[in-house]
Amino acid sequence: MPNIRTITIFFASAIDGMEDERQNLNTVSDEIGNLLKRDNIFAKFIKWENFMKLEDYQRDPAGCQARIDQSLRNSDFSLFLIKSRVGEMTQHEFKVARILQKENKNHKLFVCCLNVSEEERDDSLTAFQQQLADAGIDWEECRDLLEVKRIISFRVLHHLGITLPTTPEVETAEKEGERLLSLYKADIQKQASLWPQLHSVIDSLLVQVPIVMDATTDSVVAKIVKAIELYYKADRWASKTDYDKEKYYRLLSAYAEFLNDYAMYNDALTIFQEALSISKELYGIEHEKTADIYNNTGKVYKNQGHFNLSMKYFRKALKIRKGVLGEKHFTTATSYNNIGALLNDQGDYSKALQNYFKALRIRESVLGINNASTASSYNNIGLTLYNQGNYFESLEYLYKAIEVKRKVLGEEHEDVANTYNNIGIVYDKLGEYDKALEYFEKTLNIDEKLIGEEHPSIATVYNNIGSVYKNQGNYKEALKYCTKALKVREIKLGEEHPLTAQSYNNIGRLYYQMNHFLKALDYLGKALEIRKTKFGDDHPKTKLTQELIDLAKAAMEKEQK
C-alpha cells in the first residue's frame, strides 16, 4: 500500500455573521479531505463546534473550553475562518494557538477572512485584523469558500514540503495580472484602457491549465490546486472587466466541469449557475448551450446522490435538445443516456432500458455502429439487462460493445477494460467462474498499465475477483480480495462513498457466511449507514444490506440460545 501521511487541523469558524455560509461549512473540510486523499494524505479536522454537542457549554464552560484547548494543542494546524466579527471564544482560541506557535515552530496558524463590505465589518474584526498585522501573522482575505478550500489545501501541501507546479508563462501571467489589477483599482479613469491587457492575461492563464495538469510531479493534489487557482483568478479578473461574454461562458463551463471532475460539487453548482445566467442572456433559454449547462448541472446532482434534482435538470436539457436540435441528434441521445443511467442507479431498470434504447437507436443512425458512443450504449444496455437478471441477453450486448471498442479504441484502453470487467461479472453470476476470472485478469492487465494498482477502478476488479471466490465457497481468498478493494476505496474515495459501502457490505456478507456474526454486523452497519444517506431507505441496495443485518442478528441470537 502507498505511503500514508496524516495531518490534524483545528478548524474554528465564527458562528456570528456567517449564517449564509454555515450550511456549507461542513463541505469545506469534507472536500479538502477527499482532495488530499488523492495523495494519500489524511487530514483530520477538529471543529470546535463539535464540542458544543458533547456538553452544554453554559453548564460547564471551563471543562468544555479545556477540551477544546487540548485538541488545539494536539493539532498541526490551527485555522480560523471569520467573516464580519470576532467573538470571545474565537479570541481565546486564537491566543492559545498563538502560544502554541511560539512554543512550537512546527505548529502553523493561519486566518481566512471572507470578503465583506466596510458596512458589514464589525469593530471586533477591524481590531482583530490589526492585531494580526501587528503580530506579523499572514492572513488571507477570501472571496468565497472555494478560495478558502484552495488556500487551506495549499497550506497543507506546503507544510508537507509539496510545491505547486508552475511554468514561467504562468508566473509571468499571474504577476502581470496582479499588477494590472492594482492599477485598475487605483485609477478609475484608466480602467477601460487596461481591459485588453487583462483579457490577454486571462487567456494566458486558461492556456496553462492543461499544461499544469500534465506537469511531472508526484502530487496529484498540487496540480489540481494550481489548476483551480488559475481558473479562480481568470474568473475573478474576467468578472471585473468587460471580458467577452462568449469566452466567459466557456471559461465558467470548463471551470465548473473541472470542479465536478474532482468532487467539489457545491462549487461546481455555483459556477454552473453563473454560466447558466450568461447562457440565458447570450443565447436564450431555448438554446443548446443552455441545455448543456442543464445537463452538466444534472451530472453534478447525480454525483451528489440528489437523484430528483438530477432528473429535473436532465429532463430540462432533453426538452431543449429535442426542440432545438431534433430527436435524432447525438446530444439528444446523450440526454436519453444520462436519464437511463440515473434510472438504473435508482433501480428502475425497465425505464432505464427504454431510455438506453432510445439513445442507442439515435447513435446507430447518426454515428454508426463502429463508434465509441454507440459501444457505450451497448455496454449500458448489457449492464441493465444484467441487473434485471437477463444474463444471456446481457452478454450479447456486452460482446457487441467489446467488439466495437477494441476496433475503435484498441486493446489497451480503459473503456475496453471496463467492458471486460462487465463480462466477467455476468460469467460470475452464471457460475462460469473460470471465464469470469479470465475476463477479470484481462481487466487487471490493462488497468495496471494505464492507471496503476492504487486506483478505484482496480479496487472494483479486486472486489469482483472476491465475488468469484465467494461464489466458489473459498471465503478466505474472497476476504483477501475484498479487503484489498476496501483499502484502496477508503484511501482514494473516502469512508462515506457508495463504493466503499459496497466493500463494507461484501466483507460483512463474507463474515456472515463464515459465521463471524459480530464482525458481519460491524461491516454491514457501516454499509447501511452510507447507503441510507446516499440512496435512501427504499433503494434496493439499502434494503439488501438491511436484510443481511437482520439475518446476521437472527443467526447470532440463535447461536447464543
Image: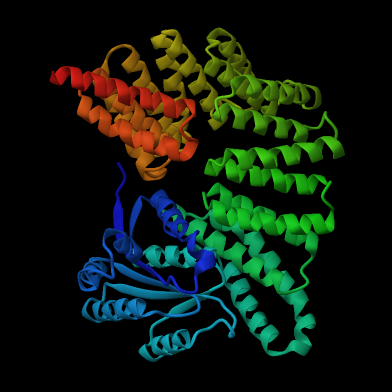
Q: Residue at x 55, y 10 (%)?
A: 390
Q: How many marks?
A: 0
Quarter of image, res 49 = bottom left
The percent position of residue 244, horizontal first and vertical second, equals: 79, 65
Q: Residue at x 43, y 89 (%)?
A: 127
The residue positioned farthest toward the front in the image shown: 59
**Image quadrant for the N terminus?**
top left
Give the side of residue 103 with respect to residue 538, left or right.
Answer: left
Judge whether 413 appears above or below 223 on screen.
above
Would you say residue 474 is visible in this rendering? yes
The percent position of residue 115, horizontal first and vertical second, equals: 55, 76
Q: Residue at x 36, y 22 (%)?
A: 547
**Image quadrant for the C terminus?**
top left
The percent position of residue 423, horizontal first and vertical second, equals: 51, 17
Would you say residue 481 is visible in this rendering? no
Judge whether 505 appears above or below 216 on screen.
above
The percent position of residue 243, horizontal first and vertical second, equals: 76, 68
Q: Residue at x 56, y 47 (%)?
A: 261
Judge whether 179 appears above or below 170 on screen.
below
Q: Which residue is nearer to you in this view: 16 or 312?
A: 16
Q: Which residue is nearer to you in this view: 379 or 529?
A: 529
